[in-house]
Image (cartoon, helix red, strand yellow):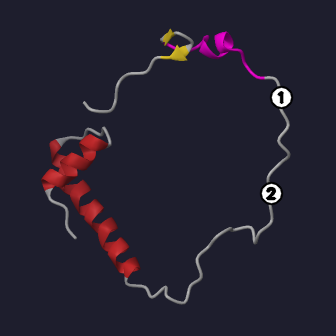
Amino acid sequence: MSLSKEEVLKVAKLARLKFPEERIEKFREELNDILDYIDMLNEVDTSEVKPLVNVNDGVNNLREDVPTPSLTVAEALENAPVAAEGTVVVPKVVGE
């Protein structure tokens, strides 16, 4: 699989990245190298490998759930740049 310049620009836009025009070709080559490596990994026979369910061999390493005092809403919103109705207001990022 090989990405075109337009596809690299689309990925950059989705990731909200901006870079100079002269670096686009370098990023295209690097992304294509990554995709080539993924294609190479897809060729490895994993039919005999059991799915990994838990890296800890079934040992539960979770701590006991103990309630502790927390911040009030007012304290949590003290450092928020913009707050309204008890929530932090953030800029719209979806659907631009």
In this view, 10 is above or below 82:
below
Residue drawn at (82%, 23%), measured in percent from left and top?
Answer: 69
Amino acid type, label 2: Asn
Residue drawn at (74%, 67%), measured in percent from left and top?
Answer: 56
Q: CA distance from mark 1 to mark 2?
A: 20 Å
10 Å crowding of disc 2: few (<14), some (14-19), many (20+): few
Q: Can see residue 9?
A: yes
- Lateral position of residue 55 relative to residue 66, left or right: left
Q: Provide the residue span drawn in magenta.
A: 70-81
Q: Nearer the viewer, residue 86 or 12?
A: 86
Q: Residue 72 location, x and y as percent?
A: 71, 15
What residue is disc 1 on? 68
Q: Nearer the viewer, residue 68 or 7?
A: 68
Q: Residue 44 location, x and y as percent?
A: 43, 85
Disc 1 to disc 2: CB gap under 8 Å: no
Quarter of the image holding residue 94?
Answer: top left
Residue drawn at (30%, 73%), measured in percent from left and top?
Answer: 36
State which quarter of the image contains the N terminus: bottom left
Amino acid type, label 1: Thr
State which quarter of the image contains the C terminus: top left
What residue is disc 2 on? 61
Q: Residue 29 location, x and y as percent?
A: 23, 62
